[in-house]
Amino acid sequence: MLDKHLGNVSHVGLNKDITIPLFSFFIRSGSVKHHWIEIYSFVEHLAEKFISPMLRMSFIVFSSRGTTLMKLTENRVEIRKGLNVLRKEIPGGDTFMHLGLERANEQIHHENFGTASVIIALTDGELNEHQLVTAQQEAERSRSLGAMVYCVGVKDFNETQARVYNTTHSILFHNNDYNMCYLYLLATIADTIEHVFPVMGGFVALRGVIDSIIKKSCIEILAAEPSSVCAGESFQVVVRGNGFLHARNIEQVLCSFRLNDTLTINKKPVEIEDTFLLCTAPVIDEVGQVVYLQVSMNEGLSFITSSVHITTTECFDGTILLITLLVLFLLMAVLFMWWFWPLCCTVVSVTLH
């Protein structure tokens, strides 16, 4: 059974200057040989939604083995070629999701370590206990490399699968609620249950979850307020963007201030909302320093970078300003007296004969 990895994609809308997070997409096939066109169509439309020229993708299929069909690239011509290769794949084989995850992890580790990445795994059907455990282990390795893991699952779930999950996790689902069992099983591979996209309407319903995937997987930095601050003073900055609540654990979210290539200072945000972070910035003494803003969703394992920055400027405190105004006032008073003195205080001498 095959799977596809649409890897390392960064999504920042149309902003061409932001370094994009990496997304990895997996699509399982094997029992899906009669639905491959729906799966391919889903992948194609999902890829088209990410339109940034900095977007990087990689295609991986997994079945009884994991195969990289296209290595990471932002070249749109190469991406189209990769999609054509994917379209011609013939589904077949077993469900070894961990082999696809291994191929993605290799690329993240060797080419993009330290850059934020997102893995989106699309699968259907059964995972036996061994396959489930190995997929969970490889997903944990993905997270150790700084990736966030999402799962898209097309419902093909049965009582056997439910028993596997119940045995492994000692949870009993009443009334044969296999849908809920399916959801929780995928959540053991994904970061959390919020990182799972269940597709209960079959393969024809796949395209219906594309917008939800984009909304939840897109984490971006759009702006900072203020954009300039006084050198040598403490201040708070509001980082505006999207997706800041999509972390596996929001306690691991960090504001990061990159002063140069070797010095980066991380701070825990004072407040976290989906569209902004309130961060206490470090005191920066140098005037004219440009500080680039980053965000980590996993306590510094990887960073979402951007071109958004703040600049330090030279500022004067109120005492200096007051003294300056006082001096100017005194100078103006002296000038005023010098100008009007001859008019009001001219002494006329009278000589008596």
Image (tube, rainbow, N blue to C red):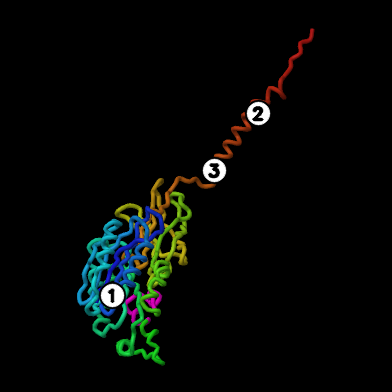
> Looking at this view, is 138 or 237 the one in front?
138
| Image quadrant occupied by the N terminus | bottom left
The kind of secondary structure element at disc 3 is helix
Q: Are marks 3 and 1 in contact (CB under 8 Å)?
A: no
Name the N-terminal-most of marks 3 and 2: 3
State the residue position of label 1. 28
Callout in the foreground (3, 1)? 1
Mark 3–mark 1 distance (CA, rounded to whole Å): 68 Å
Q: Position of residue 110 (x, y in %)?
A: 22, 63
**Outermost residue toward the bottom in this view:** 175
State the residue position of label 3. 321
> Looking at this view, is 55 or 302 the one in front?
55
Vertical side of 351 occupied by 101: above or below? below
Q: Position of residue 303 (x, y in %)?
A: 34, 62
Q: Amino acid at mark 2?
A: Met
The kind of secondary structure element at disc 2 is helix
Q: Is residue 308 magenta?
A: no
Name the N-terminal-most of marks 3 and 1: 1
Vertical side of 77 occupied by 1: above or below? below
What label does residue 216 carry, if any?
Answer: none
Q: Position of residue 194 (x, y in %)?
A: 40, 75
Q: Is residue 111 left or right of residue 298?
A: left
State the residue position of label 2. 337
